[in-house]
Amino acid sequence: MQLSTLLLLAATTVLSNGNADTAGGLQVKLLTFNIRYGTANDGDNAWPHRQEMVGNVIRDEAPDFCGLQEALRFQIDAVRQAVPEYAECGVGREDGKTKGEYSAILYRRDRWQLDRGDTVWLSDTPTEPGSASWGNTIPRIVTWGRFVEKETGRAIFVFNTHFDHRSQPSREKSAEFTAALILREAKGEPVVLMGDLNAGEQNPAILRLKQKEGENAVGLVDTFRVVHPDAKDVGTFNGFEGRTDGEKIDFVFVNPSAKVVSAEILRSNRDGRYPSDHFPVNAELVFPMK
């Protein structure tokens, strides 16, 4: 039996076992998706050839929240045209307005309302647009929001980020900063952290986010590993080739108190063509509510 079939069966099993005790909890579906910046010289894989597929992934998954990485303004506009039921939170990393890549959060406007949120820079001057100071030569950001369920008033914090691809010191500093940011803003409410972290599962930056004790420990849980603890072919950077080797660098993290109903690396393609050079990753969660 192929690994993809095994993963699907595992996710289905968890889903069927999980429904019995989700009553009363806050059920949320997430998707993190590095869509590859739209001005890249990617030939047959350039944005105009992928745009429809990206929109289809989001439409088919129908998440409550979708964290996009590497998204330029015109790409977000195209995605939102394809899935108009979503609103957005976030700004461009170059100027704090529309210039440069976003780490945008798309959210279902029919269910959720943005209560408050912000974009901050992963640097020593986090409120200064375009700043970079930890070894990364390009700006890196975290976009976050507190979203309130319109029908019930229940709230969830969603954080979306894209760590640096070259500098390990920057990744570690970014993890430390993000952990402190989560604690400062969320104050015990349900939390999701999504993103392309450019770091494998044993990287110190990832381990820092999972840290359960010590200063600014958030003890986040990798949703995929809750469902698939022993999966081997988990690479999420596919290079437009569908590769599954390499490390899993795209994550949906969550509070340890949340129930992970399902989680999957999505490897859909059209005749061998992929929506992006990263596989999107999803998760369905239930947060216990007091």
Image (cartoon, rainbow, N blue to C red):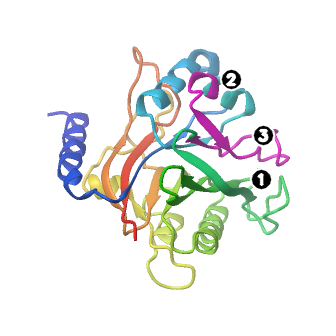
Instruction: Please state if 250 lies on the left or on the right of 7 as rendered.
Output: right
**Local secondary structure at mark 2:** loop
Q: Which residue is mark 1?
A: 137
Residue stretch rendered in magenta on the structure: 80-107
For the stretch drawn in magenta, the main secondary structure is loop
User: Is 222 located above or below residue 39 in the figure?
Assistant: below
The percent coordinates of residue 252 (x first, y second) are 46, 53
Instruction: Assess disc 1: are there few (<14), some (14-19) or many (≥20) residues with their C-alpha within 10 Å of its C-alpha.
Output: few
Mark 2 or 3, nearer chain start = 2
Which amino acid lies under the numbered mark 1 shown in the image of this protein?
Thr
Distance from Cα at disc 1 to Cα at disc 3 = 14 Å
Quick check: is 179 in the magenta stretch?
no
Instruction: Please state if 133 lies on the left or on the right of 181 as rendered.
Output: right
Which amino acid lies under the numbered mark 2 shown in the image of this protein?
Asn
**Local secondary structure at mark 3:** loop
**Local secondary structure at mark 1:** loop
Label 3 near label 1: C-beta < 8 Å? no
Image disc number at residue 100: 3
Please, which residue is most extreme toward the left here? 1
The percent coordinates of residue 151 (x first, y second) are 49, 50
Which quadrant of the structure image shows residue 135?
Answer: bottom right
Distance from Cα at disc 1 to Cα at disc 2 = 21 Å
Mark 1 or 2, nearer chain start = 2
Q: Is residue 165 visible?
A: no
Q: Which residue is mark 2?
A: 41
Distance from Cα at disc 2 to Cα at disc 3 = 16 Å
Viewer-nearest residue: 238 or 263: 263
Please, which residue is most extreme toward the bottom here? 214
Which amino acid lies under the numbered mark 3 shown in the image of this protein?
Gly
The residue under the point 61% across, 42% down is: 69
User: From the image, which quarter does the N terminus lie in?
Assistant: top left
Mark 1 or 3, nearer chain start = 3
